Image (cartoon, rainbow, N blue to C red):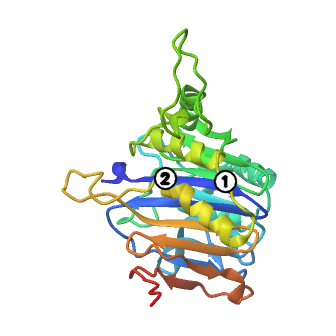
């Protein structure tokens, strides 16, 4: 059911820069919050090795000692998330004129070396996204990526015509269709506003009968196109203080607008897709916050509490049991 997987990624800026996503799945790959220290050796399928690199924190499934990151940020404030992009994503045979990087290697390749989007663009110009499975029993996932630093975001899509980099001025990414469609589709909602609407109906005197009518027409379904619009609207209209607690609280509220509850999306096998986890990375401080479907209490891992000069992965299992704060 790979084609059914859905997710939403956003950025948010207050005093610090925040980056995160929902991962919408009906099952788990035993993912953990994983910190990769600077001296953990990344061995790439092209024969190259990054023996020393930027430290990385994110959500990953660790297989055979290798962190398969879903989304992550490095110690320099650059962040990347891979989101499902079925039927559109296309990877290529090895190209002797390029640096061949398998899609599951893209996050460590970029975050291990790049500090800014300008450096990312240079790296992307040099690579070929290589159709190379991690293992026979683990084929490649069809992905596109949102990459952000504190100043801007881009979307990267590799399709049959090649690799395309889009400017992403809204700092939002979901799934299909291609990113250029989402931006065109967004213009259909150009009149949405957080203010009460003005009467433009004509000669009839009409007045709003409740608050929130300026956003009538905001999509409420869970399709990727609708989630893109809703996440963009909520993010771009969000107001919060710039303290850490206010910022992360607002960030989780933004992604809460597109989360999936069990029962709303039924799959062909009778299971239900849910928002398995929601993440928020303070990319300036290297702190990874998350909630899970079962546990809405915010948990956190601070990469700087690990030995970042080490060579061994740190993996933190998700806190999935619901925690209740009794007040009496």
Is residue 132 placed above or below 214 in the rendered structure? Answer: below
Describe the element under mark 2 as helix, strand or loop: loop
- The image quarter in which residue 86 lies: top left
x 45%, y 82%: residue: 319
Disc on res. 257:
2
Q: Residue furthest left?
A: 270
Q: Describe residue 79's horizontal placement relative to residue 276 as left or right.
A: right
The answer to which of marks 2 and 1 sits earlier in the sequence is: 1
Residue 88 image offset from top left, x and y in percent:
46, 40
Observer-nearest residue: 317 or 212? 212
Describe the element under mark 1 as helix, strand or loop: strand
Residue 235 image offset from top left, x and y in percent:
62, 49
Is residue 100 placed above or below 327 in the rendered structure? Answer: above
Q: Residue furthest top?
A: 203
Mark 1 Cα-neighbour bin, 10 Å: few <14, some 14–19, many ≥20: many
Asked if residue 160 shows in the view, the reply is no
Asked if residue 279 shows in the view, the reply is yes
Q: Which residue is mark 1?
A: 147
x 38%, y 82%: residue: 321
Q: How many marks?
A: 2
x 72%, y 78%: residue: 51
- The image quarter in which residue 274 lies: bottom left
Q: Describe residue 70's horizontal placement relative to residue 86 as left or right.
A: right
Point out the image quarter for the C terminus. bottom left
Residue 308 image offset from top left, x and y in percent:
72, 85
């Amino acid at each position: 059911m790979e084609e059914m997987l859905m997710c939403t990624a956003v950025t948010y800026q207050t005093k610090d820069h925040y980056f995160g996503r929902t991962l919408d799945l009906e099952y788990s790959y035993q993912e953990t919050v994983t910190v990769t220290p600077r001296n953990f050796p990344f061995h790439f399928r092209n024969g190259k090795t990054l023996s020393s690199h930027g430290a990385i924190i994110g959500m990953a499934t660790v297989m055979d000692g290798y962190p398969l990151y879903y989304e992550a940020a490095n110690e320099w404030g650059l962040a990347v998330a891979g989101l499902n992009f079925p039927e559109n994503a296309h990877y290529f045979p090895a190209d002797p004129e390029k640096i061949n990087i398998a899609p599951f290697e893209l996050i460590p390749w970029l975050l291990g070396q790049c500090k800014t989007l300008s450096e990312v663009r240079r790296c992307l110009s040099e690579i070929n996204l290589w159709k190379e499975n991690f293992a026979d029993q683990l084929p490649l996932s069809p992905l596109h990526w949102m990459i952000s630093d504190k100043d801007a975001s881009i979307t990267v899509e590799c399709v049959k015509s090649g690799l395309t980099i889009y400017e992403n001025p809204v700092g939002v990414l979901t799934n299909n269709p291609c990113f250029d469609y989402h931006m065109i589709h967004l213009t259909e909602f150009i009149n949405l506003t957080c203010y009460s609407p003005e009467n433009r109906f004509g000669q009839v005197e009409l007045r709003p009968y409740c608050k929130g009518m300026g956003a009538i027409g905001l999509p409420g379904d869970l399709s990727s196109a609708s989630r893109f619009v809703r996440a963009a609207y909520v993010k771009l209209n969000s107001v919060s203080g710039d303290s850490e607690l206010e910022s992360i609280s607002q960030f989780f509220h933004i992604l809460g607008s597109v989360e999936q509850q069990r029962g709303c999306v039924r799959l062909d096998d009778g299971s239900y897709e849910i928002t398995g986890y929601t993440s928020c990375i303070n990319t300036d401080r290297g702190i990874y916050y998350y909630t899970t479907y079962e546990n809405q209490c915010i948990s956190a891992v601070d990469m700087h509490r690990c030995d970042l000069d080490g060579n061994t992965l740190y993996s933190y299992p998700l806190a999935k049991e619901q925690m209740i704060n009794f007040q009496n």
